[in-house]
Image (tube, rainbow, N blue to C red):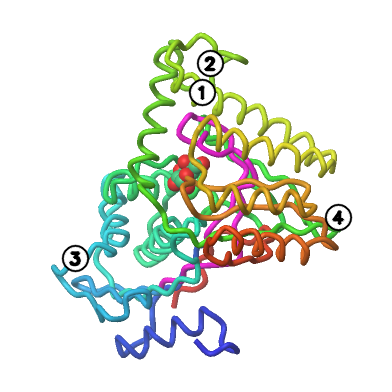
Amino acid sequence: MTTSQPHHEYVSELHRRIYGSEAKTLAAAPGRANLIGEHVDYCDGLVMPFAIDRYSHVTASASPQWHIYSTAHADDGVISGNDHPDWTRYVHGVQSSLADWGYHCGAAQVVIDSHVPPGAGLSSSAALTCSVLRALIALYDLDVPVNEQIEIAQRVETHYVGMPCGPLDQSASLLSRFGHILLYDCRDRSVDYIPFDPPSHGLELMLIDTRAPHRLVDAEYADRRHSAEDAARRLGIPSLRSARSEAWKDIADPIVSRRARHVVTELERVHATIAALRAEDFSTVGSLLNAAHDSLRDDYEVSSIELDSAQEAAHRAGALGARMIGGGFGGSVIALVPADRSDHVAASVSEAAGERGLPEPDIMTAAPAHGSLHLSTT
Ligand code: GLA
């Protein structure tokens, strides 16, 4: 892509070049960060994500059979007909998942170009799935309520890819609003928004991609989800969302008890964060982020040396708070930083990684961006 050319123009031009005609529809969906509410979405919890300004763009035109081109797999060329390399599950899975919900769409000529970095814990796969979903919905003129879109996109992961995730990433990608934190209730699916514009408070939201290799993420993730469900069963409740304060003390198994403690205290931290954000009390928000990191590291055991290094260094260098985001075992740390400390925080995080022989982190400033967009249909 030339730097002066907007992303959507680039992908439309690619479509024209590859298929020899204009794309019928163009859609985009972003990656996400999560302010707080980690590993609670599959426990019916409340999450507080926001879209980041990195999108997956998808063009589509109706066609008798599938033709799929992705710039991330340019060496594969256009994948046609019955050829199904692994990465195309995110496209075919959308068609199948729509059908599971009773929405039938045909095949398409598709071009995918994503700027959401893979492996950074910023939900590149939800961005891809949601952008394909939005493109097919527009192309085949389907009337799918947004809460069903979230479930359809989530089912692509749980059923067609095999990742037993909750609805955090898909809700963030589909529902986020510019300048706001999304408040998504995974139990009753209700939606609220809290305005959040860090620069107007002299703050910066920093995303630190540790660039660490993901290790055993899927198996460890499934294991945590299993423990959380086991804890709810032992307590005789539908999910840990219904647990009363300190309910984990009634669970004899020490590992299940500690994991339940993470979920229950994280849900309490979400409520405290909502109150602190509404009161514009950002130092309390920062302390809650630090406490969430400690809980994810010690009770849920989903952190890593790289994440701990970035979190500690950011905190020591003056961040109001910092924590790992997403599933863990690699990926990114979010830090809430006074704007005048941000260079120092970034330098300290890089230096700490260097001293420990860890990869040089990739650091960017984030701000709540637009959720998925249906950009055009011709
Ligand atoms: C991954 C999953 C989400 C969520 C987070 C942890 O990103 O895809 O559903 O469980 O981990 O909060």
Please tell me which residue is depicted at 62% across the width and 43% down the height of the picture.
48
The amino acid sitting under disc 2 is: Trp
Disc 2 secondary structure class: helix
Observer-side mark, 2 or 1, equals 1
Please give the range of residues in magenta. 30-58
In this orientation, which residue lies closer to the viewer: 311 or 357? 357
Q: Does the magenta run of residues contain 38?
A: yes
Disc 1 secondary structure class: helix
Q: CA distance from mark 4 to mark 3?
A: 49 Å
Q: Where residue 156 sits: x, y (%)?
A: 33, 50
Observer-side mark, 1 or 3, equals 1
Please tell me which residue is depicted at 64% across the width and 52% down the height of the picture.
334
Query: Residue 144: which numbered mark, if any?
Result: none
Observer-side mark, 3 or 2, equals 2
The amino acid sitting under disc 4 is: His
Q: Residues within 10 Å of mark 3 (few under 14, many from 20)?
A: few
Kindly check if marks 2 and 1 are in contact, taking CB atoms under 8 A apart as contact: yes
Q: Where residue 350 sits: x, y (%)?
A: 64, 64
Kindly check if marks 1 and 3 are in contact, taking CB atoms under 8 A apart as contact: no
In this orientation, which residue lies closer to the viewer: 150 or 334? 334
Q: Which residue is mark 3?
A: 84
Q: Would you identify the image quadrant in which residue 128 lies?
A: bottom left
Q: CA distance from mark 1 to mark 3?
A: 42 Å
Q: Which residue is mark 4?
A: 201
Q: Which residue is mark 1?
A: 258
Disc 3 secondary structure class: loop
Disc 4 secondary structure class: helix
